[in-house]
Image (cartoon, rainbow, N blue to C red):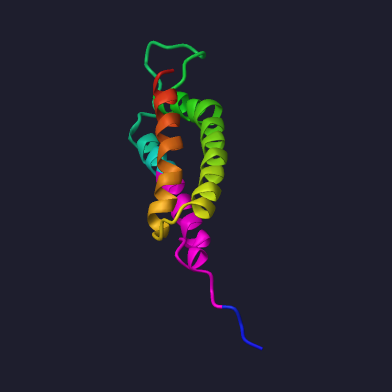
Amino acid sequence: MTLAPPRPDIARRADRRASLLVLIGWYAAVVVAFGLFLGTLSGSLPADCGEGCDSERSRMLLFGLYVALPAMFLALLISLATLAALASRTRIRSAALVGTLSAVVPLAVCALLSASL
């Protein structure tokens, strides 16, 4: 009784776990960049402002919480679906390329939509 040889189409595909780690790395880079951007904003209130004013940092934090976070979640869902399609249907052997392709397009669309608000 002999074992069947490995199928060449499966052996040439990118590793799904490594592609997922690359995808997560892209999203972590976006979150870290937003945190660094928040660190550059002023946290002080204008002197001539009453109680209803917010600092630049708090306004951007609220924007991130109510606009960017849901957009990133939607982009992550699209990225995961793209990752599954690319990993199973293409013959790309590089896990870094598969993870990057599945992350960059939804993140770019998310950035463009967030910047237009």
Depth check, front residue: 97 or 32: 97
Residue at 36% from the left image edge and 36% from the top image edge:
37
Which segment did they paint magenta?
5-29
Q: Position of residue 68 (x, y in %)?
A: 49, 30
Q: Name the dominant secondary structure of the magenta segment.
A: helix
Residue reaching furthest right?
Answer: 1
Q: Position of residue 69 (x, y in %)?
A: 53, 33
- Can residue 25 be seen here? no
Depth check, front residue: 53 or 77: 77
| Rendered position, 85 above or below 1 | above
Residue at 55% from the left image edge and 45% from the top image edge:
80
Residue reaching furthest front?
Answer: 1
Depth check, front residue: 79 or 68: 79
Task: Say whether residue 24 is magenta.
Answer: yes
Residue reaching furthest left?
Answer: 40
Q: Quadrant of residue 102?
A: top left
For the image, the number of numbered tags is 0
Is the C terminus in the top left, top right, bottom left or bottom right quadrant? top left
Is the N terminus in the top left, top right, bottom left or bottom right quadrant? bottom right
Q: Position of residue 63 (x, y in %)?
A: 49, 25
Residue at 40% from the left image edge and 19% from the top image edge:
116
| In this picture, residue 91 sits left or right of residue 81 | left
Q: Position of residue 98 (x, y in %)?
A: 43, 52
Residue at 54% from the left image edge and 54% from the top image edge:
88
Task: Say whether residue 20 is magenta.
Answer: yes
Q: Quadrant of residue 94?
A: bottom left
- Can residue 5 be seen here? yes
| Rendered position, 50 above or below 38 | above
